[in-house]
Image: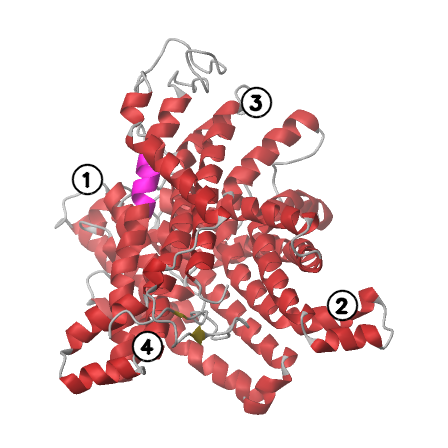
Amino acid sequence: MADVHPTVIDAPDQSGVRLNRPTIADESDLVSWRFRLRLNLPLLIGAAIVLLSVGLALTAPWLTSHDPLEIADASLSPPSSQYLLGTDQLGRDVLTRILYAARSSLAAACLSAALAFVSGTLIGLLAGYSSGLLDACLMRVLDILQAFPALLLAIALVAAIGPNLPNLVFTMGLLFMPRFARVARASTLSVRERDYITASIGLGVSRARILWRHVLPNIGAPLIVEASLTVTIAILTEASLSFLGLGVQPPDPTWGGMIAESTSVMALAPWLALSPGFAIVFVVVGFTLMGDGLRDALDPRS
Amino acid sequence: MLRYAAGRIVLTVPVLFGVSLMSFAIIHLIPGDIVSVLAGPTVALDSEAAQNIRHALHLDQPLPVQYGIWLIGALHGDFGNSLVMGLPVGPQIASHLPVTLVLTALSLILAIMIGLPGGVVAATTRGRWPDLAVRGVALLGLSTPPFFVGVAAVLLLSIYLPSFKTLGAVDLHRDPLGGLQTLLLPAFVLSLASATTIMRYTRVAMLEVLAEPYMATARAKGAGRLRVLIRHGLRNALLPVVTAVGVTAAHLIAGAVVVEQVFGLPGIGQLMLNAIYHRDYTQVQATVLVITTLVVLINIMVDLSYYLLDPRIQQHG
């Protein structure tokens, strides 16, 4: 009776108006979505870019002979065989710094998305399954959180509690939590009306077990898609924060910070601004393609 | 209409209340005693000077009282005095707001001008190269942080078009035309992400409308291709597009904070960031509250525009 079918629900957006995408739960399909993940081109390309980026970030210390903080003799030297992407105004190797910046950027993005995923799903499950007063209260809190433009609240919160990696993860996790809570709640609302949930209640299964064993597996697909797209927004948010000097602090490298530092010497060394920018675009394109591909692969309608 | 509008506005009161509470609370998240931050480490926390600062900022009152004093002041446009400059924050915000509003409005217009035709072209050429090209550009637009586009644009223009004024002061009062010209490039940079969002929504909505039987009927009765596309197609696809415009308007205001920083524009975003860099917390509170209230108001306007666009809401509304 578990894992009966996929349920893909569009979360109502903030203003409560839905897009015209149909909402379908295919009752007759008895195969779990986990076994029906159809591969498609965007998914493959996206996953390849993501794996490559994560791999490069993890193996950074072995890939380069330089240290991200090491100051060479030549500052602002153009790309050469020794410094593949040149050096910055302090003579640090740009390629090395981009690789090390990928570590903090990807860590902040993935950890905050994971935090938002877990906390948002829990809140959405609770709100959707209990309904009533608890649901109403939780939803109003989410309304307030989502009333703030995410980047604005991130800037203010990080500035208040201090710019470092754990605080970035916490802040972005809090900001992205409502996205997951809304998706989880909407899916839970439809799943809980199904016969197999009624049957479980009739059998005397505990509420916690119903949520864990019967509801959660059936609302997973849209949450996974949301997670992939949230990582892209998290990377862009982290980049904006570090561009404004509110990310991981110097001398540790960040993509946004490298672009900000490069603006003062832009005319002399254009490669300084361009290479970290292309790194951001590359990784975000990867996660976006993966998210779009996952949506197509997990969506029973397409 | 009035009843619907009134109901919609009443619903936002609790949200605005919560927003004000959070804007107020941010200042109290700062670890340690704020007086030591303000007065410097040399001033003892129990000295008379420290007590005077506490009293002046109402920090000797209980938190709910502090919040009450601040909120009542804010409702009257009095956000307290800047901790760094000592001047009232309200007039500062009033003088910085026009640049941000003009920048945002200009970006929104550009985003619609780029996104709407792009989405229609992509939908009508589904699967063929114009569709793929538009979608490819959209993917890049969504994946590129606006500040990077800004930096790259300034870089390219300074090399290939040195006469183009990319950075510089904007004075909308004394020189409105020159100000608008200076705002054009920042507005374009800011509009890209929104343009792609509007384009994606338009494409999906148009694809659905194109499959409707009344489109074929309109063609069959002899209406021209363009006329069918716009009068029968786009009009019916407009509702989700309005959603996109609403969603992106909120993003635009937040994005303006960063873009103003790239181009050195004297908007409210610059005011907020300067306040953050100088630890001017009353100014941070006030700017966060004002910007977020603006976003909430935009969302109300979007909801009301559904009402005007969609007769079905009027019947049930």
Nearest to the eye among marks 3 and 4: give it: 4
| Residue B171 in sight in this render | no
Quadrant housing residue A222: bottom left
Q: Nearer the viewer, residue A70 or A287?
A: A287
Mark 2 or mark 1: name the one nearer the start of the chain. 1
Picture coordinates of residue A190 (x, y %)?
36, 78
Q: Nearer the viewer, residue B156 or A228?
A: A228
Q: Kindly identify the amino acid type of the residue bearing the numbered disc 2.
A: Ile
Q: Residue drawn at (59%, 46%), measured in percent from left and top? A: B136
Magenta region, mostly helix, strand or loop?
helix
Q: Kindly identify the amino acid type of the residue bearing the numbered disc 3.
A: Ala
Nearest to the eye among marks 3 and 1: give it: 3
Q: Kindly identify the amino acid type of the residue bearing the numbered disc 4.
A: Val
Write down the residue under mark 3. A267
Write down the residue under mark 4. A191
Q: Residues within 10 Å of mark 2 (few under 14, many from 20)?
A: few
